[in-house]
Amino acid sequence: MTHRPARTARNMPPRLVLLGLLASSALAYAWPDRFGSGFDPFLASKPYLWPLIAAAMFVIGWLLPRDEVRQVAHRWPAVLGGTALQYAAMPLLAFGFGLLLAPDRDALVGILLVGCVPGAMASNVLTLLARGHVSYSVGLTTAATLLSPLVVPLAMRLTLGQVEVAFPVGRTVAELVGYVVLPVVTGHLLSRRLASWRRLVCRVGPVVANLAILWIIAVVVAANRGRLAHPQPAVLMALLGVNLLGYLAGDLGSRALRLPPPMRRALTLEVGMQNAGLGTTLALGLFPDRPAVAIPGALYTFGCMLTGTVLASYWGGRVAATEGAVQSPSVPPSVAETPGTGLANRPR
């Protein structure tokens, strides 16, 4: 049985989230010009980004329906298949668009880093907004990040040959476990124990998760104002191509894997949304004397969040409209998806 809180939690206004993304990002970018170079709330909160991510993931864990968790446990080949799809499609897309459009070597390396890193943790929140299979999304992010110490150096070596990628294995795995896996597991276990809190968390939880991700994006924009100020058109086109074709690869691959619609939405977002923040960090660490290498990662961080929010908002609105139509006597119940399962509602 699909738990009612998960359904309620997903009834968020997608347009409000999209408007919030645009407004908060614009405010973060223009803050010094509008309010002077004194106190900057976005940069001041940068040290607290990881706890904010943990809070959002805790809420997501609380809202996970039990049947979704069971499905992921029983369909682990779908997690491995989705992860393989991501690590095959994105490096190839980045390599192709980089060779085709990158104006110089630094831009090429930066674009390749974007394509080789694992999926973004924000995809889990956007999967919630899209009414997708959140447990599957968390499983994909976890698997991709755990494999990234092996895949990222290999992908960079195959595409660039002589580049040596010193991947921060221990730190990356520790961050994943501490700020993603543990909060999700803790939130899910507490939701089973504290049933009396369920209604309150399902009412305010999605708001907390969405506000957290909007603030995180705004902080990323504020931290990269200089890099975002004068982007090269060719680099923008290359990154847009990687992003949009990444979504397409995720959609086609999920259909080839015969996944139900909620899992298709989760995989599509996971493939197209890369952890470009990690790519930016790697670029600054590996190429400290070549700051231009970090520009594609900074651009992709905001760009994929913008396109991902638009896509998730569209899906969320469409599924909500379908569910509303089911409540009409003239529409058979079988046309609607059961949130979190992708199965059709059966007549009662």
Image (cartoon, helix red, strand yellow):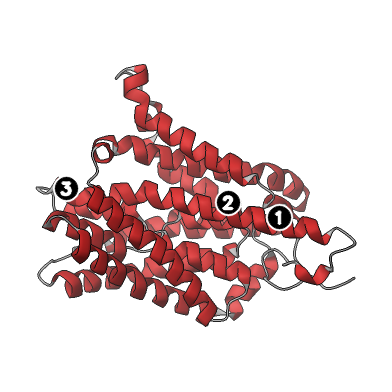
Helix, strand or loop under label 3: helix
For residue 201, above or below residue 340: above
The secondary element bearing badge 2 is classed as helix
Marks 1 & 2, CB-CB < 8 Å contact? no
The quadrant in which residue 142 appears is bottom left
**Residues under numbered marks 2 and 3 in contact, where contact means CB atoms less than 8 Å apart:** no
**Quadrant holding the C terminus:** bottom right
The residue lying at 39 percent from left, 66 percent from top is: 245
- Residue 326 in percent (x, y) is at 81, 61
Judging by the rendered image, the residue that carries numbered circle 3 is 292
When asked about the image quadrant of residue 191, the answer is: bottom right
Query: Mark 2 Cα within 10 Å, few/some/many (few <14, many 20+)?
Result: many
Q: Amino acid at mark 2?
A: Ser
Q: Where is residue 306? Give x, y as percent.
A: 45, 48
Residue tagged by mark 2? 313
* Mark in front: 1 vs 3: 1
In front of the other: 257 or 155 = 257
Residue at 47% in and 76% down: 253
> Badge 3: how crowded within 10 Å, few (<14), some, or many (20+)?
some
Mark 1 vs 3, N-terminal side: 3
Q: Relative to the observer, which residue lies in front, 14 or 266? A: 14
* In-image side of 59 versus 148 (left or right): right
Residue drawn 24% across the image and 43% down it: 231
